[in-house]
Every structure is written in C-alpha cells, then in structure tokens.
Image: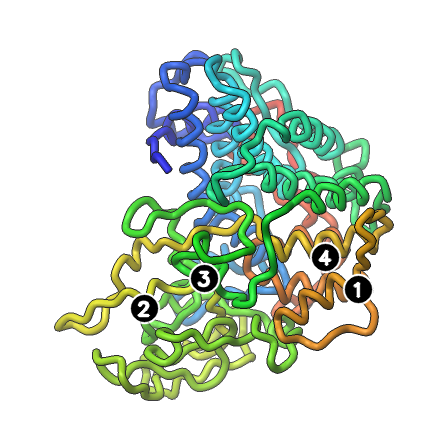
Amino acid sequence: MKNIKLIGIGLVGAILMIGCTDLDEELNDSVNEAAGFSASDLLAGAYSSMRELQHEQDILASYVHSSDELIAPTRGADWDDAGAWRDHHLHSWTNTHPHIDKTWRDLNSRAFNAQLVLCNGDASATEIAEATFLRTLSDFFTLDLFGVVPRRACNEDLLQPPTQQLGRAEAIDVFISEMEAVLNDMPTANGPITATQNAGRMLLAKLYLNKAVYKATGQDGVAQPGPYTFDPVDMTMAINHLNEITGYSLEDDYFSSFTPTNTETSTEIIFVSENELGGATGNIRNRWHMTMHYNQQPSGWNGFVATADLYNLFEDGDVRRSTDIPGLTDAFGYNAGFLVGQQQGPSDKTLTSLIDLEDRPGNPLVFTEEVDIFSSNERNGIRVIKYLPNLELSADADGISFSNDDAPGNDYVFFRYADARLMKAEAILRGGTDTNGESALAIINELRTSRNASMLPAVTESDILDERSRELYWEGWRRNDQIRFNTFLGTWQAKADASPERALLMPIPAEALATNPNLTQNSGY
C-alpha cells in the first residue's frame, strides 16, 4: 500500500479535537485545507496511520492489560514506570495517565485522518466507504473506552473545539447507520489490508453485539454495569451480517494467522493493519519482545506475562496453548503459545543444538505461574508468543541476529473469522435468529475441534466468554468481552479487589478537557 506521510495533517485537527496543546504544525483554517491532496492519497494516509494502534501503549494496554489475561509486573527497577502498567491491571487510572492520553489522541487522530477523505470533494463512493469504515473503527474504540466521541463537520474552524460530542446511546445508532449506508460501496476484493465488505459486515456485527452495553447509559451519561438486556432483533442483525461474511474458513494451523506472512497464508484474516517487511511497520515486534526474557532470541524486554487464570483455561493438547513451530522451536527452544518451565536456547550460532538458559544472575530460567505485580524476579510469570518473530536469520561475530526484527512483516489482525464464528454463537445464545439453522453449541464445538480441544456437551454464556479468551487471548478484545459478559469489575490474579463502576469507562485525559470545554469528565474521575 502507498505510504503517504499525512499524520501531521491528521494531528492538526486531532490536536484541537482531543486536547493536545503541543503544536508542531501550523494550524489550518478548516478540515478542507487537506483538499490539496487527492482522495486516494488521503485514504492511503488514513490506512497507514492505523499502524500506530499496534503500539503497546494503545489497544494492548487498554484492552488486555486491564483484563484478566495479562499482568505487567515490576521487576526490580524494570517496568515500574511510576505505576502506569499496574494502573491498567488494577483499574486505578487517573486522567493524567500517559497511556490513556496517548490512546485518546491516537484513536481520535486516526478518525480524523479518515475524515479528511470524507471531506474531500473528489472522493469516489468506494473511497468514502473505506474511509467511513476506518473512521467508525477508530470511533468504536473511542466510544468503548471513553463513552464519548468528538466529531467535526468538514468546514469547522480548527482553532475552535469541536461542537459535536456523541454520547454512548446516540453514537452506536450513528455508527450503525453510517456503516449500513456505505456497505454496498465497499470493495468486494483486495484482501485483508483493505476495508472490504466482509470487514464492514464484521464491524457492523460488533456494533450490534455491543449495542445493549452502550444503551445502558444513564441520563447523566454514566455507564451502567451488566447484566445487559440484549434485543433479539439486534442479535439477529449481527447474525445476518456474520452470515454474509464469505470466503474464509477456520485454519488448521492456528498460529498461521500471526506469522510474518499471515495475510498471504491464513484463511481466517478479514482485516489487518498492514506492516511492510523491512519497511513501514507499527512496531508489531513488541508482541514478542515485551514478554520474552533478555537471554532469549530475539532478545526480549522481560516484561508482560499471562495470568494463571488464562493459562489454566486450556486443556492439554489444545494447540492454542502450545504448538511447536519448525525453524523456531527446534532452533531457538520455544514454542508458540504459552512458555512455562525451563527455557532453552541455541548453544551457539549454528542453531543445531539447545541448552538450558539462565537468567542474568545465573539461575535456571524457569518461567513460573507465580507473579507479584509489585515485585517479581526475572523468572516470574508465564510468557506468551502469539505473533511469531521473523525467522530469517543472519549470524555475525557478535552472535545471532534476526533480519528485519525491527521491521517485521506480521500484519496486525483486527478481525478474523474465528472471532466471527464466536460472535455468531454468542448472538444465537442471546436470542438471535439464524436462518442457516446453526446452534451455538455446534459452532463452539466446530471451533474447539479445529483446535484439538474436546467437545462440550452444552454451552452457556460463561462457556462462550471462556472460549473467546482461549481463542482471542492477547488480541485486543478481552476488556470489551468482559464488560459485555459482566465480569470486568471482578477479581483475578494480582487483582484482589473488585473495581468501582467508574472503571467501565476510562477517564478523559486532562489535556483534552482543558482544550475542549464541550467535554465532560466521566463519572468518578
């Protein structure tokens, strides 16, 4: 995809829309100042700008760190960061939290970059449809996290704050209406790096599935906890859109959806943020560096770990829990999935034999379930390898190096077919009607069979929530799922206390409030 450097333009508008006061660019008079660029260039810029959401401080921090799937323990002087990572896990955020501020800015600027296309008078119907999808996807995350979405009309003065602030109950209807209006204009082909009709149907199904959560909002804008009342009509609409997603199948090789060539080889991927091997990437390498130990290859940052709650959801033999990868496991000593116990690594640059690894002080590198979020050693915590490192290697005098490790080609997965199947099972269980006549149990067991897990005799809401965690762990959906299933305010490993209801929404950053007086801080902050 053509990579146009338009992030600066997007941030001009987003700066005033979201409340950042560090202006590095001269302000334009209106959104239409971007009319000097063609619609196709603006759209390319909107696509490429989505890469920023791959950063470990964006979706991963908001949706996985805050859930029952991940812990970021402090290890001596490492990974304390003034408690920023702990705040996610313990739901103790404030409106000056640096990651939350970054996420707010990044999501709103991605939406603004897409809106530049919508405000370009030369945009085709297809370009408008793709840009609407990109704006809605970003706005969906903003609504889900913060409960409000600032928007501008095309001719608004960027020197003034945006006048429109879409609240939860209103925004979900707006998003659905906008997406349904452009669905037929979206491309039918071009693969997962493009917002196709299949991607549009997936987003619409997400909107319908979560609609009851956003409608559960008090007159003062306060988010209400579950259990929620799901309208069978909404569930049926979600099912209808999911039934129209065609051309995909469940992968026999689960981890093929996360390799450096995932969009070329996986049969599941519906929509991604594209990364170019050796070129423009969104720092997808953090997905393995953040969890691997310093002495593993490629050298990790020894940070984030899986909760024992997540690890213990799996039964023995489930390929999602552990799969040996040729060229990775035999050469470097670790599998895809969860890393537990004694870790191994190459004995030398020849990659022909493995030895037991040690930590920096010389102890056996044995990853354990035990972990203290405030004080852990190098060995504490179960590690996760889901996105696979690039296996092209070069050996030099200093040891083994991974070529293009800083710019790998793994595309970041937003939507894949297994998620669509789980969403359909959930919508059926919540009262939706499926004209294809499938049952929730049959869908779940089809998925479990493909993952070498035993079949279930029956299926409940709790079963579906657990299966979503097994299938989608660390992919960025867990917070959204836990809120919908009414478990997000509860307790889990390293989180002993239930959260107050305010945690259903994150605080709007202080900088955004300072420059946009039309925003109101979320309740409890």
Q: Mark 4 packing: few (<14 Cα in 10 Å), some, or many (20+)?
A: many
Do the residues bearing badges 1 and 4 touch, measured as CB atoms within 8 Å?
no
- What amino acid is at disc 3? Tyr
Q: Position of residue 99 (x, y in %)?
A: 49, 47
Quadrant occupied by the N terminus: top left
Q: Which mark is residue 298?
A: 2
Do the residues bearing badges 3 and 4 touch, measured as CB atoms within 8 Å?
no
Question: Considering depth in this image, is 175 or 480 the residue closer to the camera?
Answer: 175
Q: Which mark is residue 489?
A: 4
Distance CA(mark 2)–CA(mark 3)? 13 Å
Q: Position of residue 216 (x, y in %)?
A: 80, 40
Residue 316 visible in the shown view: yes
Q: Secondary structure at mark 2?
A: loop
Q: Secondary structure at mark 1?
A: helix
Which of the two labelled residues, at mark 2 and mark 3, occupies the earlier sequence position? 2
Discs 2/1, front = 1
Question: Considering depth in this image, is 134 or 59 the residue closer to the camera?
Answer: 134
Distance CA(mark 2)–CA(mark 4)? 36 Å
- What amino acid is at disc 2? Pro
What residue does disc 3 label?
387
Which of the two labelled residues, at mark 2 and mark 4, occupies the earlier sequence position? 2
- What amino acid is at disc 4? Leu
Q: Mark 3 packing: few (<14 Cα in 10 Å), some, or many (20+)?
A: many
Please tell me which residue is depicted at 80% across the width and 45% down the height of the picture.
235
Distance CA(mark 1)–CA(mark 3)? 29 Å
Quadrant occupied by the C terminus: top right
